[in-house]
Amino acid sequence: MTVKIGIIGGSGFYNMGIIKDAEEIQVNTPFGKTSDKVTLGKIKGTDVAFLPRHGKGHVYPPHMVNYRANIFALKECGVEYLVSIAAVGSLKKKIKPCDFVIADQLIDRSFKRATTFFEDGATAHVAFADPFCKTLSDLAYKTVKEQKVDVHRGTYICMEGPQFSTRAESNLYRSWDVDVIGMTLAPEAKLAREAEMCACGILTVTDYDCWYEGEDDVTVTSVIETLKKNDKNLADVLKNLVPKINYERNCRCKNALEGAIITDPAMKKKNAKPEVYKLLLKKYLS
C-alpha cells in the first residue's frame, strides 16, 4: 500500500478516534526500530500513515526518539507530505495556551540527535533556508483559521531536553524573537527534507514556558491538561486538512536532493549502501 500523507504526533492522537479502518504494520529500517508500529488508515476517506513519535504510552524521551527510523519508515510507506504535530511552550504573551502555531522557521539547539541519513557512502547538503514546505504550511494555516481557532505563524526553537528550560534560557530565546519552544521538530524537519517530503509543523501551545512571571512554571501535569482541552480542535483541524492535501507538488521539496549530493559519482555508486540509500538515492544513482 502506498500512502502519501504521513502524520507524526503524540500518543494521545489515538484517543481522538479520527483514523478509521486502522491497521498496524511493522516497518523495518536500516536505522533500527521505529518508535512504534505504523498505523495505516483513513481520515475522511483519505489514506494516512501515523506514527506516535514517543511510542504508545510515551516511552521515548525527545533525545531518545529514533527520528531516522521514523522518517525512513514513512518514506518506505510512500509518504510525500508529512504533518508533524507537537506541543510547544509560548515565548510571547500574544501566543496563548490552546492557540495553534504553524512553524515557518526553526532554530536547532539540540545536540544528541542523528539528523541526517547521509553518513556512510554519500554526502549530501540539502538546502534548508526555509525548513518547512510553504505550500503545505499555508494550507495548514488556512485550515486552522477556518476552524475559528487562534493561529499564528512563527519560529520554533528546538531544545535538547528532556528538562524544561531555565528562566535564563527562556529569556535568551525571547531576546532572539523566537515564538515557541519544543524538543522534537528540528530532526523531523531536517530528515523530511532529505527524504524529499513536504513537511509542516502544526504546534499546539500548552504553556508560557517559564519566562512569564504571571503564570505558574510549566509542568507535565499542566501540559497534559491543556493538550486535553485542545484535543477536539486538533481533531477538527486534521479532519479538514487531510482531504485537502491532494495538490500537485511543484515545490522544491520533491527534488531536495537534486544537486545536493557532493560525493564523486563513481564513489557514490560504488559505496552507497543499497539497504540504506536505495530508497533515497535511486533516481540519482543512474
Image (cartoon, rainbow, N blue to C red):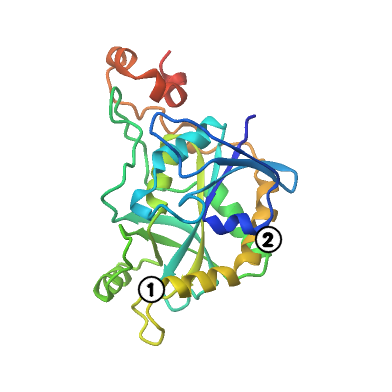
Give residue 249's quadrant in the image: top right
Which residue does the numbered mark 1 point to in the structure image?
A: 209
72 or 24: nearer the viewer: 24
272 or 264: nearer the viewer: 272
| Left or right of 27 in this view: 131 | left
- Secondary structure beneath disc 2? helix
- State the residue at coordinates (68%, 61%): 236
| Left or right of 90 in this view: 265 | left
| 128 vs 273: above or below | below
Q: In the picture, which quadrant includes the N terminus?
A: top right
- State the residue at coordinates (66%, 66%): 232
Q: Residue furthest right?
A: 45
Q: Amino acid at mark 1?
A: Asp
Give residue 154's quadrant in the image: bottom left
Q: CA gap, disc 2 to disc 1?
A: 26 Å
For disc 2, the neighbor class at 10 Å (few under 14, some 14 to 19, many from 20) is some
Q: Amino acid at mark 2?
A: Asp
Q: Position of residue 14 (x, y in %)?
A: 61, 54
Q: Position of residue 233 (x, y in %)?
A: 64, 66
Which residue does the numbered mark 2 point to in the structure image?
A: 236
- Secondary structure beneath disc 1? loop
| 166 vs 9: above or below | below
- State the residue at coordinates (41%, 30%): 257
